[in-house]
Image (cartoon, rainbow, N blue to C red):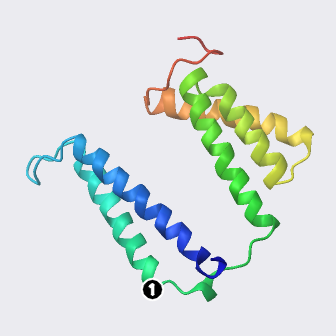
Amino acid sequence: MSKHLYRLAPLVLLLFGIAAMLQARDLSLGELSAPGPGLWPFIVASLLSLTAFVLLFVDDPADYEPWTRGTAGIALGLLSLGIFIVLFQEIGFLIPAVLMLLVWLRLFAQEPWRWAVPLAVLGAVAFQLVFVEGLGVPFPDDIVLGG
């Protein structure tokens, strides 16, 4: 079993790509002359699926590095990003952004608290200003800033 473990990632990506293709199709693909909202996601998901399918058969296990402590750090980074996304939708941007930046600055950049806290707060405020005020991106209602 372990000698084929390297095929797990392409298989997961293939399943993810197929699911994304089905969801994009439900959004309506439209036509090339009048594309629907699902056309671009469908194209990207198709390319992801095709690449994952090819990797299932031509990927060389010698290309992979062994699992190390650094691998756990990557998993933790992805987990924190997932938590950020859920919190962002539920309570807005500012608090999840500060928390995620704080985790990343402390754990990954190994910044001391005296730098991590102000950088996390200033970074979150800067992103809020750039995206909401500068670019007009609609964020969910924020519990700190109000609706």
Closer-to-camera residue (70/8):
8
98 in relation to 91, above or below: below
Q: Is residue 10 above or below residue 92?
A: below
Query: Which residue is found at the position 50% from the left and 28% from the top?
Result: 132
> In terms of image quadrants, where is residue 126?
top right
Q: Amino acid at mark 1?
A: Val
- Measuring from the top left, give residue 108's x and y in whole percent: 79, 54
Q: Tell whether 23 sits left or right of 33.
A: right
Residue that badge 1 annotates: 58
Circle 1: element type: helix
Q: Is 57 situated above or below 68?
A: below
Task: Specify the quadrant of the image occupied by residue 57.
Answer: bottom left
Quadrant containing the N terminus is: bottom right
Residue 94 lies left or right of residue 89; in this view the side is right
Residue name at image x 74 percent, y 31 percent? 121
Question: Which one is nearer the viewer's eye here, 79 or 125?
Answer: 79
Q: Residues within 10 Å of mark 1 (few under 14, many from 20)?
A: few
State how many labels appear: 1
Q: Nearer the viewer, residue 121 or 52?
A: 52
